[in-house]
Image (cartoon, helix red, strand yellow):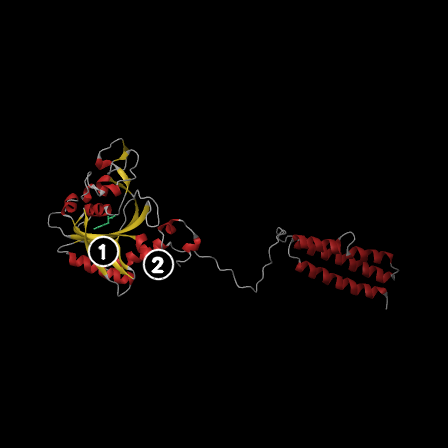
C-alpha cells in the first residue's frame, strides 16, 4: 500500500473540511480565515504540495497526484472567490448573540393621554344621546369670548377670564393683523369653550345638539388644582320647547353612564352671564358633593347676538376635563397631566 493512496485519502478529507469551513463562515472575515488556513502560503494545501514535491513517487502516481492537487487547488479557489461575496463582517459588538429560542421582544405600544381618554369617553356618551362633536379655535376674538356671551367689558366675571391677549390685533373675519384695537377685533387665547357656541350658532340653523372639547387658558397661578391651561367640554342644544327638564335629563343620563348607574347629581342655583336660569352641577362622591360643571338655559341676549329670533330655546353646559379625570381616577394634582412623567402616564392603559 503506497503513500500515494494515503495522500489521496487525505486530499479528499481536506477538501471536505475546507468546504465545510467555508459553508460555516459567518461573514467575509470568516471566509478570509478559511483562505489563510487552506490556501495560504503556510496553509494545508501548501503543505501537501511540499509533501508531494519531496516524495519519492512512482511515475504513474506522480502524474495522478499532481493532477489531483492542482484540481483541488482550483476548486478551493473557485469556492473561495464565490464565498468572498459574503456580507462584510458586522462591527464587533459586545452584545449577546441572537438566540432564536428566546421569546420575542414585544414592541412598546404607545397609548392615549389620560385627558384624551377622558375627553373621548365624555364625548362618546353625548354622541349616543344625539350630540355631535365640533371644535373651535384656541385663539378667539374678544367678541366671541365675551361680548356675544353677554359678558360686557365692565362685567366682574371678566376678571378671572381677562387674560392672554395677543399682541397687536386681528380682524375677526380675515384673521389679518391690524393695529386696530377696537374690542370686536381684539384676539386672545380663549378662556372657555363657550365662544364655540357663538361660532356654531352663527353658521347653523336649529335644531342642533353639539359638544365641544378643547383647551382653554386662564391667568391662574399653578397649584394642585389650577393651571394656566386646561380642557373643557362645552355642550349646546337648541330646539323648539327645550326646557330645564331636558337639560337635567341629558346630564343625569350622561353622569350615570360616565360614573356608574347609581350616580347622583344635584343642580345648585348659580350665576353665569350666558345662561338664565343657571346652575352648577354637583356629583355625589364618597366624601360629599363635588362640583363638576356649570349649565343653564341659553340667555336671550346670546341668541340675539347670533341673530336667532326671540323665543328661541336651548340649554348649555360646560365642564372641566381635568377635574373629571381627577375624580374618576383619584388623582390629587392637576400638574401630573402636563408633566409627561411616564410612570404616571403608563397607569392609563
Ligand atoms: N364657560 C363656563 C366656564 O368656563 C362654563 C359654563 C357654564 C359653560 C355654564 C356653559 C354654561 O355653557 O351654560 O366657567
Where residue 3 appears, x then y in whole percent?
85, 64
Q: Residue 24 location, x and y as percent? A: 66, 60
- Which class describes the residues within 10 Å of circle 2: few (<14), some (14-19), or many (20+)? few
Q: Which residue appears farthest toward the front when viewing the image?
A: 287
Mark 2 or mark 1, which has the lower sequence index?
1
The residue pinned by badge 2 equals 329
Q: Nearer the viewer, residue 202 or 259?
A: 259
Left or right of 204, for residue 167: right
Quadrant housing the C terminus: bottom left
Mark number, residue 89: none
Task: Identify the residue shown where x is 83% and y is 59%.
Answer: 63
Question: Residue 64 or 302: which is nearer the viewer?
Answer: 302
Residue at coordinates 43% horizontally, 51% vertically from top-left?
341
Residue 215 visible in the current orientation? yes
Furthest toward the left, the residue is 311
Q: Which residue is mark 1?
A: 281
Horizontal side of 115 relative to 22 (left or right) equals left
Amino acid at each position: 500500500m503506497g503513500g500515494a493512496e494515503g495522500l489521496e485519502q487525505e486530499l479528499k478529507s481536506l477538501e471536505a473540511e475546507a468546504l465545510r469551513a467555508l459553508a460555516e463562515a459567518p461573514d467575509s472575515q470568516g471566509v478570509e480565515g478559511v483562505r489563510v488556513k487552506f490556501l495560504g502560503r503556510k496553509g494545508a494545501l501548501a503543505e501537501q504540495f511540499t509533501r508531494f514535491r519531496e516524495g519519492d513517487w512512482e511515475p504513474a502516481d506522480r502524474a495522478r497526484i499532481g493532477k489531483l492537487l492542482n484540481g483541488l487547488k482550483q476548486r478551493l479557489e473557485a469556492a473561495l472567490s464565490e464565498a468572498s461575496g459574503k456580507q462584510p463582517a458586522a462591527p464587533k459588538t459586545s452584545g449577546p448573540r441572537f438566540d432564536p429560542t428566546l421569546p420575542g421582544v414585544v414592541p412598546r405600544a404607545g397609548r392615549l393621554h389620560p385627558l384624551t381618554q377622558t375627553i373621548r369617553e365624555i364625548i362618546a356618551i353625548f354622541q349616543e344621546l344625539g350630540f355631535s362633536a365640533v371644535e373651535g379655535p384656541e385663539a378667539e376674538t374678544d367678541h366671541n369670548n365675551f361680548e356675544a356671551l353677554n359678558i360686557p367689558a365692565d362685567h366682574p366675571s371678566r376678571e378671572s377670564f381677562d387674560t392672554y391677549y395677543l399682541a397687536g390685533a386681528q380682524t375677526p373675519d380675515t384673521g389679518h393683523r391690524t393695529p386696530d384695537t377696537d374690542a370686536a377685533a381684539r384676539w386672545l387665547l380663549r378662556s372657555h369653550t363657550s365662544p364655540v357656541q357663538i361660532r356654531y350658532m352663527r353658521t347653523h340653523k336649529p335644531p342642533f345638539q353639539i359638544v365641544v372639547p378643547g383647551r382653554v387658558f386662564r391667568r391662574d397661578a399653578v397649584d394642585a388644582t389650577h393651571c394656566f391651561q386646561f380642557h373643557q367640554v362645552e355642550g349646546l342644544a337648541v330646539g323648539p320647547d327645550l326646557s330645564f327638564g331636558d337639560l337635567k335629563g341629558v346630564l343625569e343620563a350622561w353622569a350615570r353612564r360616565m360614573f356608574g348607574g347609581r350616580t347622583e347629581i344635584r343642580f345648585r342655583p348659580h350665576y353665569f352671564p350666558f345662561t338664565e336660569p343657571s346652575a352648577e352641577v354637583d356629583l355625589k362622591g364618597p366624601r360629599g358633593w363635588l362640583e363638576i360643571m356649570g349649565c343653564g338655559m341659553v340667555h336671550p341676549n346670546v341668541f340675539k347676538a347670533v341673530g336667532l329670533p326671540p323665543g328661541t330655546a336651548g340649554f348649555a353646559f360646560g365642564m372641566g376635563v381635568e377635574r373629571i379625570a381627577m375624580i374618576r381616577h383619584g388623582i390629587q394634582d392637576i400638574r401630573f397631566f402636563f408633566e409627561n412623567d411616564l410612570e404616571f402616564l403608563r397607569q392609563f392603559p
